[in-house]
Amino acid sequence: MSEQQEYLDVSVWRGDASSGDYQSFRVPEYASQTILDVVSWIQQNADPTLTYRFACRVGMCGSCAMMVNGSPRWTCRTHVKKVAGKDRKLKIAPLRNLPVIKDLAADMAPFFDKWVKAGGRHAPSATRNDPIPQIKPESAGRDAANAGIECINCSVCYAACDTVTGNPDYLGPAALQRAWTIVNDEKHGNRDAVIEIVSAAGGCHNCHSMGSCTLHCPNDLDPMSAIAGLKRLTARNFFKRGA
């Protein structure tokens, strides 16, 4: 005799930037089931109009990030048993701090706009005809630059950040972590400009050091420490100018 089928009580956000509400679904529970599996089941078996975003399904691209029971997560790497609890209830919504396109798909444009504004694009310090500069592997700058290099811009840290919620002009953890990488990269051609940007309104000194960005990063990066590094660097730069 087969075991009795268990079900999950799933509430999913439906709507767009102007209006919406949660819709309830009863989803079969299976072994090793992820949150992305749950969303896919709803779209394939209950409501084909459900809109969401995913790509690799193996925790590499970050495009499936959503709010799950109030926390931002990669849904492909979040197992149901980890978050559903004994009551088997799930509440799934688009990433917060971003506009909603439709249902579970958030508009990533503001996130990337801030990444660019923080100086995230590389500025070469040499031409292709110049010799490639040698950076010592043991240098402090290289270690600092490498610390955030695995960021894949999934925006989980941005959704986790209460400072972003309260201050829409704040650049956010990912953009500032990228800025920390840039100012420690000896091959970058305009590090002073990046320092000026992150010193201004909406920059690193708006961070309240609550640590939600580091806590929720799926790649175990530490944006809070990168932002702290920017605070120290920009403060030293300010006092040097005063002197």
Image (cartoon, helix red, strand yellow):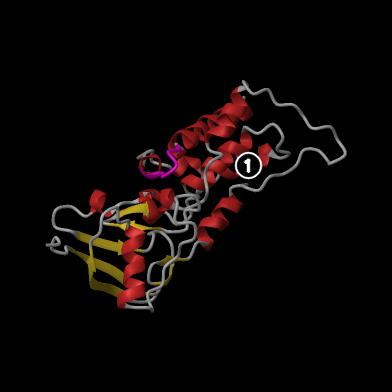
The region drawn magenta spans 216-221
Q: Main secondary structure of the magenta part?
A: loop
The answer to whether residue 59 is seen in the rendering is yes
Seen from the viewer's position, the closer of residues 70 and 92 is 92
Coordinates of residue 33 in the picture (x, y in percent): 30, 56
Q: Residue at x 37, y 50 (%)?
A: 77
Q: Is residue 94 above or below residue 44?
A: above
Q: Residue at x 48, y 65 (%)?
A: 107
Per the image, the residue denoted by label 1 is 194
Q: Residue 222, located in which quarter of the rendered image?
A: top left
Coordinates of residue 79 in the picture (x, y in percent): 30, 52
Where disc 1 sits, the SS reads helix
Quadrant where the C terminus sits is top right
Q: Residue 105, located in which quarter of the rendered image?
A: bottom left
Seen from the viewer's position, the closer of residues 184 and 193 is 184
The answer to whether residue 242 is seen in the rendering is no
Magenta stretch holds residue 217 = yes
Tell me which amino acid carries mark 1: Val
Q: Is residue 177 above or below residue 100?
A: above
Q: Is residue 132 left or right of residue 202?
A: right
Q: Is residue 229 left or right of residue 209?
A: right
Magenta stretch holds residue 56 = no
Q: Residue at x 28, y 55 (%)?
A: 70
Characterize the local packing of mark 1: few (<14), some (14-19) or many (20 or more) Cα atoms within 10 angstroms. some
Taking the view exactly as shown, the residue that stands out farthest to the right is 129
